[in-house]
Amino acid sequence: MKVVVAHNRYREAIPSGENVIVDTEIAQLTAAGVEVLPFQRASDSIGDLPLAQKALLPISPIYGRAAQRDLADLLRRERPDVLHLHNPYPLLSPWVVRTAHAHGVPVVQTVHNYRQVCSSGLYFRDGHNCTDCRGKAFGWPAVAHKCYRGSAAQSALMATTLAVHRSTWKSVDRYIALTGRIAAHLKDYGIPDERIVIKPNGLPDPGEPAPIGDGFLYAARLSPEKGLALLLDAWRRHPDGSLGQLRIAGDGELRPLAERAAAERGDVTYLGALDREGMVAARTAASVIVAVPTWNDVLPTVILEAMAAGRPVLGTDVGGIGYLLGIGESVEAAGWAVEPDAAALAAALPIARAGAAAVAPAARERYLRAFHPDVVTRRLIEIYTSLAENSHPPNR
C-alpha cells in the first residue's frame, strides 16, 4: 500500500491539533508497513516564497498552480494507491482532488472542521455558534461578517473558493468523519452515506500513566471559541485556593485575560506556550484536564492526550466532546461534560476535583479501547484497502 498524505500545515506559532494528528498518523501508518509519501506545504513558508508565487497567493485557495504541478509529478512518478487529504488551505487548494482524479488516484479526506460550508471552518462567529452560510450557494454572510481572518476581501475569496469547489468536494471518493456530528454535516452537504465512514483520530501510547497530580490544567489556543473566558468566570465563583491550582497553557489573542487572572488570584498560574515536553510535565502535574470550547469543537486533541495519560477531562457538552469521553455509553465515562454555561461549569469543578482519582482509570481505558494506534490505524488501512480495491469513482 502506497499513500500520499496531503496537508497544508498551520502556522507553528498557533498550536494546531491537526498538525499533531497528521504527523502522528504518518508515523503510525509507516510503523504498520504502509509506504507514506508526505505532500505538505506550510503556511509559515509564505514569507519565503518567490515573488511570482506570492503574486498568485490570492487565488491559491481556488487553484494552487505550483502545488498541482508538484503533485502531478509525484503521482506520475510514484503511482500511489490513494491520496489522503487533510487541510488544503491556502497553498494546496481543493484542486488536489481533481489532480489526483486526473491521474486515476482515489481520494480520502479526513474532515477536521466545517470548511466545506463555513469560511472560518468553525460554525462560530462573534462569540456564538453560527450556521448562516449553510445551504447557501455563496456565503455572503461570511463576507458581511469578515469571518475569514477578519477581512472582507479574504472572506470573499474563501466564500468564492467554497462555491467553486462544491463539485470538487462532492467528488471525493471517501470521507472520514471523526464523529457522528461530522457525518451529519457531510450528509447535510449532500454526500451520500456510502461515501462516509466514521473513524476518530488516535495518538501514540505514552505508556502507563504517572500517579495523578493535583489541580486543573487548561491547555488550548487562547482564542474566544476555546472557552477561556467561560472557565475563568466559573473559577471566580469559588474562593481563591478552594479548588487547588488552575494552570493555563497556550498563547493567542486572549493572553492578557490569562495574565490578568494569574495576577489577581493566587490559585491561577499562566504557563505561556509550552513545547511537547512542557505539556507532558503540566499534564502530569494535574488531576483534571479542562476542555471547555463554546463552539462545536470536532475532536479536541487535548482530550485524546489527557485520556492517553490517564487524566479525566471536564469538558463542555459541545461538538465531539461527549463522544470522546464516552458520555452515555454502557461503560464508565472518561470525565464530565456540562453545558457551556458558567454556572454549570462552576458547579462541576468541585465534583471533578473530588472524583478525579476514581475516574482516572476509566480515562485510560477509554483511550486504549477507542483511540489507541492498534485500533485506529487498522481501521484506516481497511479504508484505504477497500477504496483502492473497490472504488467506483463518481463521474468527473
Image: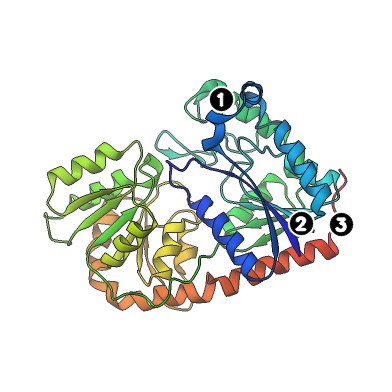
Q: Residue visible at 18% across and 49% down?
A: 236
Q: Horizontal and vertical percent for residue 359?
A: 34, 75
In the displayed structure, 288 sits above or below 41; it is below
Residue 363 shows up from this direction? yes
| Disc 2 versus disc 1: nearer the observer | 2
Q: Which residue bears the numbered disc 2?
A: 82
Percent coordinates x, y for residue 272 in the rendering: 29, 46
| Residue 159 higher or lower than 356, as above or below | above
Quadrant location of residue 291? bottom left
Dot 1 corresponds to which residue? 154
Q: Which residue occupies 88% across, 46% down? A: 395
* Amino acid marked by disc 3: His
Distance from the alpha carbon under mark 2 to that under mark 1 = 32 Å
In the rendered structure, which disc, 2 or 3, sits on the residue that comes first in sequence? 2
Instruction: Point out residue 162 in the picture as x, y percentages from the top left corner.
Output: 66, 34
Residue flagged by tag 2: what amino acid is it? Val
Q: Secondary structure at mark 2?
A: strand
Q: Which residue is mark 3?
A: 392
**Quarter of the view holding residue 53:** top right
Asked if labels 1 and 2 touch by Cβ distance under 8 angstroms, the answer is: no
Amino acid tagged 1: Gln
Residue at x 25%, y 55% (from the top left corner):
247
The answer for how far apart the CA atoms under marks 1 and 3 are is 36 Å
Side of 352 where 332 appears, left or right: right
Determine the secondary structure under disc 1.
Answer: helix
